[in-house]
Image: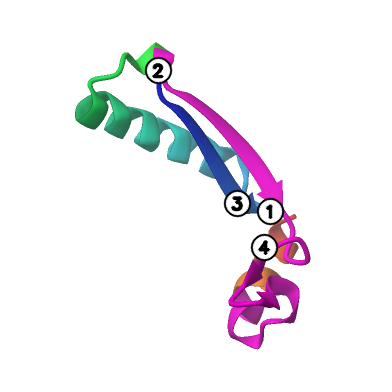
């Protein structure tokens, strides 16, 4: 039984999470030969101030400012 953990910046819609879950479950069925009902996913929402890339908080990384702002607008 595949257990899949997904970390996303806060702000994704339920529709986005649902579509992602369906696509990943289908891939697990095809690639891992898992039963669809046995594919388990846990979504963890993170905020830009709780994750760092290359030692820089995402909330302070100018190269990620547009992505962070878009997620803030959706949340």
Q: Estimate the x, y position of residue 37 in percent, counting from the top left.
A: 41, 12
Camera-side residue: 60 or 66?
60
**Numbered disc in front, either 3 or 4:** 3
Q: Does the CB distance between marks 1 and 4 fall below 8 Å?
A: yes
The image shows residue 56, relative to residue 47, as above or below, that is below
Mark 3 and mark 4: Cα distance apart in space: 10 Å
Where is mark 1, residue-wise? 11
Tag 4's secondary structure? helix
Query: Up-down: is 28 above or below 50?
Result: above
Q: Mark 4 points at which residue?
A: 71
- The magenta segment is 38-66
What is the CA distance from the residue labelled 3 to the residue labelled 1?
8 Å
Q: Name the residue under label 2.
A: 1
Quarter residue 30 falls in: top left
Say which residue appears at 69% left-offset and 47% top-offset. 45
Q: Is residue 15 left or right of residue 20?
A: right
């Amino acid at each position: 039984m595949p257990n899949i953990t997904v970390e996303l910046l806060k702000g994704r819609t339920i529709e986005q999470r649902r579509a992602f879950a369906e696509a990943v479950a289908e891939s697990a069925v095809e690639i891992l030969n898992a039963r669809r009902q046995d594919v388990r996913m846990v979504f963890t929402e993170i905020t830009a101030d709780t994750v760092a890339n290359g030692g820089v908080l995402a909330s302070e990384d100018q190269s990620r400012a547009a992505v962070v702002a878009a997620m803030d607008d959706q949340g």
